[in-house]
Image (tube, rainbow, N blue to C red):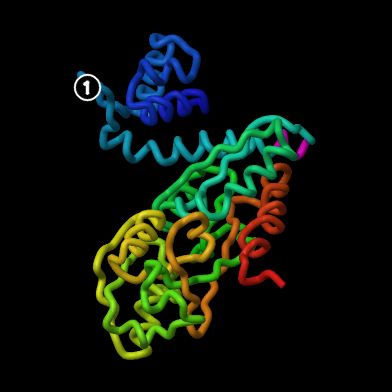
Amino acid sequence: MSLRQMEYLVAVVEEESFTRAAEALHVTQSALSHQIKALEREVGGPLLERMPRGVRLTAMGRAYFPHAELAVRSARQARRAALAAGGARTGELHIATVHAHALGVLPEVCARWARSHPGVRLVLHEYATTGELEEQMARGVADMALGPRPKDWPGPVSVVGSERMVLVVPRGDPLADRASVRLADLADRPWVRCSLEPVVDGRRWLDLECERVGFTPRTAVRTQHTSTAVRMASAGVGVLLTAAHELTGLDCASVPTDPPWRRDITVFSRVQLTGAAAEFTEILRTTGPAATDPADAP
């Protein structure tokens, strides 16, 4: 079996169509079908089920596909890394991140990159949760990932900044003008919970800290995206714990916790970063939230 055949299989699965996959690969549909059938003969059975509308993986295909996908993505990454190491100033850099960091961390960094590296296009892969981010990175979806420190990650992990966590309430809320708020003062408040809350030692920080001061936070609503959670808290649904940089341009009040709480922002990858990926990481260190957080300004 060849890498090209695996690439064809990955394209068909991603596009959910032989026609769209052929267009994406710039080959004829007959040539694509021929290569897929050749791969199936070599593997020893059908990998795809042809349906009236689209295709789906068979049981054998589901077992085979993750390995083919990783091989194809690793080959693409290897080519990009080699070109970057050789001094190439064109191509693509694939970055995986959680939705909250795509909104709160990356815009200024990407703008600076576009000015300094106009020939290297950025491709963002956004995910709702850190678990999904780590799973996709393990499958080789991108050259590098930006997110909270991953747990038990086998590859390189580098801290590029930190997030200052704050409590979000509507303007006019009795807490809005406070210099800081203790969690014990919020025992009777409802909470907006988000899947991207910080986790410490396998437990959500909010649950852990509230337990230490004697109460269990009462959840009013649970969201997948931080942007949704912020809007819920701004409307008065409940108190939200989130990173200060997520609130830029939003009409809400934020109050630091007492004691203060921060968490690392990291870049992690499957292999040591070189070339464009290493340069992008350095821009993150100098332009990211650690450098721009108003609370850190002199």
Residue 33 occupies which quadrant of the picture?
top left
- Residue 201: % across, % down: 44, 76
Residue under pointer 1: 51
> Magenta stretch containing residue 159, yes or no?
no
Between 175 and 115, which is closer to the camera in this rendering?
A: 175
The residue lying at 68 percent from left, 48 percent from top is 280
- Identity of the amino acid at label 1? Met
The residue lying at 49 percent from left, 84 percent from top is 258
> Magenta stretch containing residue 84, yes or no?
yes
- Residue 224: % across, % down: 34, 55
Residue at the extreme front? 172
What segment carries the magenta color? 82-86
- Residue 165: % across, % down: 50, 71
Residue at the extreme right? 87
Quadrant into which the C terminus falls: bottom right
Is disc 1 placed on a helix, strand or loop?
loop
> Is 113 located above or below residue 294 in the figure?
above
> Is 129 located above or below residue 175 in the figure?
above
Q: In screen coordinates, is 161 left or right of 263?
A: right
10 Å crowding of disc 1: few (<14), some (14-19), many (20+): few
The residue lying at 60 percent from left, 38 percent from top is 122
Residue 223 occupies which quadrant of the picture?
bottom left
Q: How many marks?
A: 1
The chief SS type of the magenta part is: helix
Q: In screen coordinates, is 188 left or right of 260?
A: left
- Residue 202: % across, % down: 40, 73
The residue lying at 41 percent from left, 41 percent from top is 66
